[in-house]
Image (cartoon, rainbow, N blue to C red):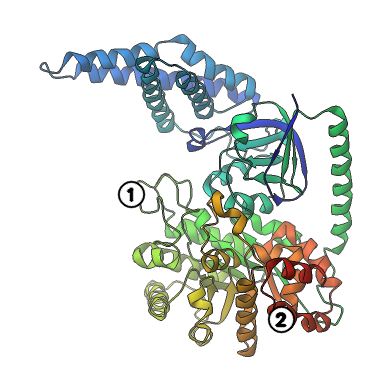
């Protein structure tokens, strides 16, 4: 049966493929599609993990004190009997062989199916037995984790059918999204999320069509069903008819042709019709993203989100040497172009994942995030600062500090930077002593106290994602209020215009590195405000460049007063669209 689901459009384009549903539980393990010659290895790992879990249970039973309650031994026997059930091992083995899942992914998929079956049972006692299966399978997962060895660290020879896979999940955290960057998935669908949730942001960075906020999608869409993701309209068509499939395939062809035309702008100088030079920079998550930035014609890295180096590491943070090598690799890949490295910015939507000390779990948007967290962990912060400083010897490097709000935070930050420099001097390690330091303006408090920032920093960058979130009092990860997140709210427009104006008047370099910079619909508005430096995901550069090439800043600036004097979002939207 064909049906349509509606959500939010967050990453444009059309994706056609088979659904791959991923539950919240299975997101907690590493996902790898494996090649045919790796199947035997993964099946053996699974078998060994079951054997290890069985031996562990037997040891626990043998070590029970003589005065232990009989129920304890019986409990261990029940779990051992479950492990010995051949069907329990048979099902994940079939997933490894047929779907090419790695062992942990296959096992959690089976667990999800089992728990769903137990949920359907009316008898309370039998229903509770689902917990036994969960505990048994979790024991096997621990054994798998202890035996974790990447079968293919490069994942370059995977089944090409992956290009027809669309991920369907309740929600996907940024550190989970990093798993999927390695694979050739063609679309994303999530139950939750807003236009500027990190699922949406990463989908745009991957240039993959996506629809978020599609309520109950993960429950209504079944594995292997054919689906269409219309990223332009935020709709998902399940089991489409041949007529609908043909229509969307035609749209895919048209979009591909339009992208090919855009490629012709790659080496065109980015200048407005009235001769204003505009700099287009790239936002990246990992060092390997730098090559794509260069290919797209970026004039530097406006935002290196360093926190992605810290994610998915089982609580083990990268040391100074590892960070230094990652930063140096990025800087060298840019061949002398500037690289702005933002110090670690963890938060409610970006925790480090699997943190054994729970220092980054369940962080409130108003809690210990950004520079607040770094200042609360001075040794970790100093390690990162030393790594960045060391990398600055390889090319033009700049440090960018997130979430600053108060003068004492600025003072503490500069003191730690000075301390990191002194530590490197004592070790006779080279670095750029004149490295530029910048601040992100993403809190209303910072926007309203611009003189304190203009007098201390070498450059500034507006993080529109958080500026909108905190100005409007909206948690952008909360699906219930996602529709209220509005970049064209009059308060946002006035704040951004004020920040840019004050920075330009002080002759301090100012850029926008939030999602608004990569939104072609907002390009002319930002030009009207006097912005000359835009930083965005590399795949958005050419679309924004096309808008700049047909813009005249003199004419655009004449419309700005009228926009700033308007307080109705719909009217502002109409005025912006008319620019």
Q: Which residue is mark 2?
A: 530
Q: Which mark is residue 103?
A: none
Residue at 64% of width from left, 72% of height from top? 490
Give the vertical position of 465 relative to 449 (above or below).
above
How many C-alpha atoms fall within 10 Å of the one at disc 1: few (<14), some, or many (≥20)? few
SS of the residue under disc 1: loop
Name the spot of residue 254 as percent of width and height, x first.
89, 47
Q: How many marks?
A: 2
How many C-alpha atoms fall within 10 Å of the one at disc 2: few (<14), some, or many (≥20)? some
Of badges 1 and 2, the one in the foreground is 2
Q: Which mark is residue 357?
A: 1
Task: Identify the image quadrant of the C terminus.
Answer: bottom right
Give the vertical position of 211 relative to 471 (above or below).
above
Residue at 58% of width from left, 21% of height from top? 95
Q: Could you say which is closer to the camera, residue 52 or residue 465?
A: 465
Does the CB distance between marks 1 and 2 fall below 8 Å? no
Give the vertical position of 4 relative to 334 (above or below).
above
Residue ranking furthest to the left: 67
SS of the residue under disc 2: loop
Let me know if residue 282 appears in the view. no
Please indicate whether residue 334 sits to the left or right of residue 62 in the image: right
Name the spot of residue 142 as percent of width and height, x first.
39, 30
Q: Quadrant of residue 500?
A: bottom right
Residue at 53% of width from left, 52% of height from top? 477
Q: Quadrant of residue 179?
A: top right
Please indicate whether residue 569 sits to the left or right of residue 263 in the image: left
Name the spot of residue 442 as percent of width and height, x first.
54, 70
Mark 1 or mark 2: which comes first in sequence?
Answer: 1
Task: Identify the image quadrant of the N terminus.
Answer: top right
Please indicate whether residue 31 sits to the left or right of residue 266 in the image: left
């Amino acid at each position: 049966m064909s049906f349509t689901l509606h959500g939010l459009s967050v990453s444009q384009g059309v994706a056609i493929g088979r659904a791959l549903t991923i539950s919240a539980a299975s997101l907690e393990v590493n996902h790898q599609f494996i090649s045919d010659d790796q199947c035997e290895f993964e099946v053996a790992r699974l078998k060994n993990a079951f054997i290890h879990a069985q031996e562990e249970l037997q040891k626990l039973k043998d070590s029970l004190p003589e005065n232990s309650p009989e129920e304890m031994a019986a409990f261990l026997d029940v779990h051992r009997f479950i492990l010995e059930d051949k069907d329990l091992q048979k099902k994940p083995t079939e997933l490894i062989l047929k779907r090419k899942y790695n062992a942990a992914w296959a096992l959690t998929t089976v667990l999800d199916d089992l728990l769903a079956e137990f949920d359907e049972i009316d008898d309370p006692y039998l229903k509770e037995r689902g917990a036994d299966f969960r505990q048994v399978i979790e024991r096997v997962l621990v054994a798998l984790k202890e035996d974790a060895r990447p079968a293919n660290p490069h994942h370059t020879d995977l089944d090409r059918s992956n290009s027809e896979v669309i991920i369907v999940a309740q929600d996907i955290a940024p550190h989970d999204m990093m798993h999927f960057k390695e694979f050739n998935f063609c679309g994303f669908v999530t139950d939750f999320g807003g236009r500027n949730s990190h699922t949406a942001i990463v989908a745009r960075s991957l240039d993959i069509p996506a629809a978020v906020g599609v309520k109950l999608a993960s429950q209504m869409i079944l594995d292997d069903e054919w689906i269409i993701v219309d990223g332009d309209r935020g709709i998902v068509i399940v089991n489409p008819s041949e007529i609908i499939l043909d229509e969307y395939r035609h749209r895919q062809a048209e979009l591909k042709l339009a992208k090919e035309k855009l490629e012709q702008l790659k080496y065109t100088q980015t200048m407005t019709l009235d001769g204003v030079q505009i700099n287009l920079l790239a936002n990246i998550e990992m060092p390997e993203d730098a090559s794509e930035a260069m290919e797209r014609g970026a004039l530097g890295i406006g935002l290196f989100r360093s926190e992605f180096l810290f994610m998915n590491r089982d609580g083990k943070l990268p040391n100074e040497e590892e960070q230094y090598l990652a930063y140096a690799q990025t800087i060298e890949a840019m061949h002398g172009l500037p690289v702005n490295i933002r110090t670690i910015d963890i938060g409610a939507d970006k925790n480090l994942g699997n943190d054994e000390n729970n220092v980054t779990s369940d962080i409130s948007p108003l809690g210990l995030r950004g520079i607040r967290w770094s200042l609360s962990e001075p040794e970790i912060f100093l390690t990162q600062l030393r790594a960045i400083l060391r990398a600055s010897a390889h090319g033009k490097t700049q440090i960018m500090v997130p979430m600053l709000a108060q003068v004492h935070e600025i003072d503490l930050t500069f003191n730690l930077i000075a301390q990191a420099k002194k530590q490197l001097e004592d070790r006779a390690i080279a670095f750029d002593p004149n490295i530029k330091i910048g601040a992100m303006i993403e809190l209303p408090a910072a926007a309203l106290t611009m003189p304190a920032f203009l007098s201390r920093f070498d450059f500034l960058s507006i993080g529109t994602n958080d500026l909108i979130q905190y100005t409007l009092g909206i948690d952008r990860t909360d699906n219930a209020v996602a529709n209220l997140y509005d970049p064209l709210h009059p308060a946002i427009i006035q704040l951004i215009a004020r920040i840019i104006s004050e920075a330009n008047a002080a002759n301090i370099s100012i850029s926008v590195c939030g999602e608004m910079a990569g939104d072609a619909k907002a390009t002319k508005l930002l030009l009207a405000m006097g912005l000359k430096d835009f930083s965005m995901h590399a795949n958005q550069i050419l679309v924004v460049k096309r808008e700049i090439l047909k813009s005249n800043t003199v004419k655009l600036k004449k419309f700005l007063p009228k926009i700033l004097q308007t307080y109705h979002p719909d009217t502002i939207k109409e005025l912006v669209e008319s620019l």
